[in-house]
Image (cartoon, grey):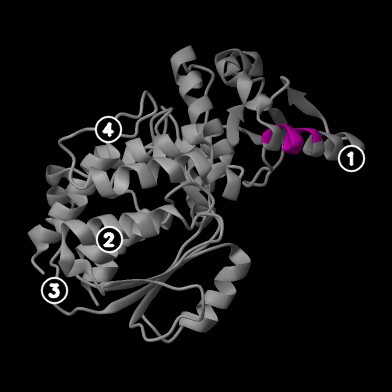
C-alpha cells in the first residue's frame, strides 16, 4: 500500500469529521461514504455518555473538530516528511488510555501511516469510536483491511508495543513488553506559570486549559505556580464564564466530595463555587480542584520544572521558553508527542 494512499484515507476521514463541530452537526453531500457512516457516528455521539459519563457531546465534538483540523493533506505530508519511513512492515500492539475522547487516535494514526499493522487494546472507557473509524478508513483504502485488529484479550503475535497507563500499570507494561521495542507512558500533568501580568484574555484561556475534558487529560492544567502575594481574584474573575460546569452532576459530585475531604482535614482552601484552589507541592490534583505553589523567581522555577520534567506534560506560560500559549493545551499539533517521546521516530526505526 502506497504512502499517499494511506494519507488519502486519513484526509478523507478528516473531511468526514468536519461535519461534526462544536457549532453544528451538518451532513455534507461532498463527503465520501456518508450513507454508510454518518448516522452511525451521530448515533454513537448521542449515546457516548451512556457508556462513559465524562464523555459529553460537547467534549467529543471538540475532539472531532480538533482532529478534523489536523487531518489535512498538507499537515500530514509536512509531518511525515521529517522521517524516513521504511518498508519493514511490523505488527505494533497499542494499549490505549480512555481518559478523554479519542486519546489513542494519535498512536493509531502514527502506526498506520508509518506502514505497520496495528493490534489495538482499547480502554473500556473509550472503545466505540475507533472501530468505526477503522471501518471508515478501510472503506476508503481497502489496503488497510487485515492490518487493523482489535482485541480485548491477551496481546500476542506482535513485534513492538506502545502502552499508555498509570504509574502502576507502567510496571506491568515494562514486565510484559520489556523484551520488545516499546514506548511506555506514565502519569503526567500540565502546569501553568503565572506572574501576575497576564491579561484577562490569558486567564480566560487558562480556564479552557483547566476545564476542557473536566481536567481529565494529561494536557489539562492541574497546578499553578504563582509569585508570593499573587491575587487570585483576577483568576477567579476571568474563569467565571466556566461556572456552568458545576451543573454537570459527575463534576459536582467530585467537587462536593473533595471539598468535604479538604475541610475535614482542615486544609485552607480558596474556592468560587465550582473550583477549589489548594496549596500543595503535588502535580496531580483531584477533579474540581487545582493545586498551587509559590515560587521565588523564574530562574529557580525553571530549574524545578526541568528537574520534574518526567512528571510534566506541558507548561503554560508567557514567561518561560518552550511553553504553550494560554488556552492551547488541548490543541496539540501532530508533533506534540505524549511524554515528549517521538512516536513516529520510534516506528520508523523498527
Camera-nearest residue between 282 and 188: 188
Res. 1 in view = yes
Q: Is residue 141 left or right of residue 202?
A: left
Q: Earlier in the sequence, mark 4 or mark 1?
A: 4
> Which of the two labelled residues, at mark 1 and mark 3, occupies the earlier sequence position?
3
Looking at the image, is mark 4 or mark 1 nearer the viewer? 4
Q: Which residue position is annotated with label 3?
A: 86
Magenta span dominant secondary structure: helix
- Kindly identify which residue carries mark 2: 110
Residue 94 position in % (x across, y down): 40, 69
Task: State the CA–CA distance, disc 2 to disc 1.
Answer: 46 Å
Looking at the rendered image, the disc whose residue lies closer to the viewer, 3 or 4, is 4
Q: Which residue is mark 4?
A: 27
Give the residue number, with chain letter if any, for mark 1. 265
Residue 342 seen in the figure:
no
Q: Are marks 3 and 4 in contact (CB under 8 Å)?
A: no
15 vs 41, left or right, is: left
| Label ID, residue 323 | none
Query: Which quarter of the rendered picture does the N terminus lie within?
Result: bottom left
Which is more N-terminal, label 1 or label 2?
Answer: 2
| Distance Cα–Cα, label 4 vs label 1 | 53 Å
Specify whether 292 is left or right of 316: right
Q: Quadrant of the C terminus?
A: bottom left
Question: In the rendered structure, which segment of residues is drawn in magenta?
Answer: 251-256
Image position, residue 75 (x, y; %) = 17, 44
Q: Earlier in the sequence, mark 3 or mark 4?
A: 4
Amino acid at each position: 500500500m502506497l504512502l499517499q494512499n494511506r494519507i488519502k484515507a486519513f484526509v478523507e476521514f478528516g473531511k468526514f469529521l468536519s461535519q461534526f463541530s462544536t457549532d453544528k452537526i451538518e451532513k455534507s453531500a461532498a463527503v465520501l461514504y456518508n450513507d454508510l457512516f454518518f448516522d452511525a457516528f451521530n448515533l454513537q455521539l448521542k449515546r457516548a455518555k451512556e457508556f462513559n459519563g465524562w464523555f459529553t457531546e460537547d467534549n467529543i465534538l471538540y475532539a472531532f473538530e480538533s482532529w478534523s483540523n489536523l487531518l489535512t493533506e498538507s499537515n500530514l505530508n509536512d509531518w511525515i516528511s521529517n522521517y524516513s519511513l521504511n518498508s519493514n512492515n511490523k505488527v505494533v500492539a497499542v494499549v490505549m488510555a480512555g481518559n478523554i475522547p479519542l486519546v489513542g487516535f494519535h498512536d493509531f494514526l502514527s502506526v498506520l501511516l508509518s506502514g505497520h499493522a496495528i493490534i489495538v487494546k482499547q480502554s473500556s472507557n473509550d472503545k466505540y469510536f475507533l472501530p468505526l473509524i477503522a471501518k471508515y478508513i478501510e472503506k476508503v483504502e481497502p489496503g488497510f483491511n487485515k492490518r487493523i485488529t482489535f482485541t480485548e484479550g491477551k496481546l500476542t503475535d506482535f513485534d513492538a508495543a506502545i502502552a499508555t497507563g498509570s504509574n502502576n500499570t507502567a510496571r506491568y507494561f515494562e514486565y510484559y513488553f520489556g523484551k520488545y521495542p516499546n514506548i511506555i507512558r506514565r502519569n503526567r500533568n500540565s502546569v501553568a506559570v503565572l506572574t501576575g501580568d497576564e491579561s484577562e484574555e490569558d486567564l480566560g484561556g487558562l480556564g479552557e486549559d483547566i476545564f476542557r475534558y473536566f481536567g481529565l487529560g494529561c494536557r489539562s492544567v492541574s497546578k499553578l505556580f504563582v509569585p508570593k502575594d499573587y491575587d487570585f481574584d483576577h483568576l477567579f474573575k476571568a474563569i467565571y464564564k466556566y461556572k456552568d460546569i458545576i451543573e454537570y452532576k459527575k463534576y459536582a459530585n467530585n467537587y462536593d466530595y473533595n471539598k468535604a475531604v479538604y475541610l475535614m482535614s482542615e486544609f485552607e482552601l480558596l474556592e468560587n463555587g465550582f473550583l477549589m484552589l489548594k496549596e500543595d507541592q503535588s502535580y496531580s490534583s483531584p477533579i474540581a480542584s487545582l493545586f498551587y505553589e509559590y515560587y521565588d523567581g523564574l530562574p529557580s522555577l525553571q530549574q524545578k520544572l526541568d528537574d520534574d520534567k518526567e512528571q510534566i506534560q506541558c507548561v503554560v506560560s508567557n514567561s518561560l521558553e518552550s511553553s504553550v500559549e494560554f488556552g492551547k493545551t488541548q490543541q496539540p499539533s501532530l508533533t506534540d508527542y505524549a511524554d515528549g517521546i517521538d512516536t513516529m521516530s520510534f516506528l520508523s526505526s523498527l
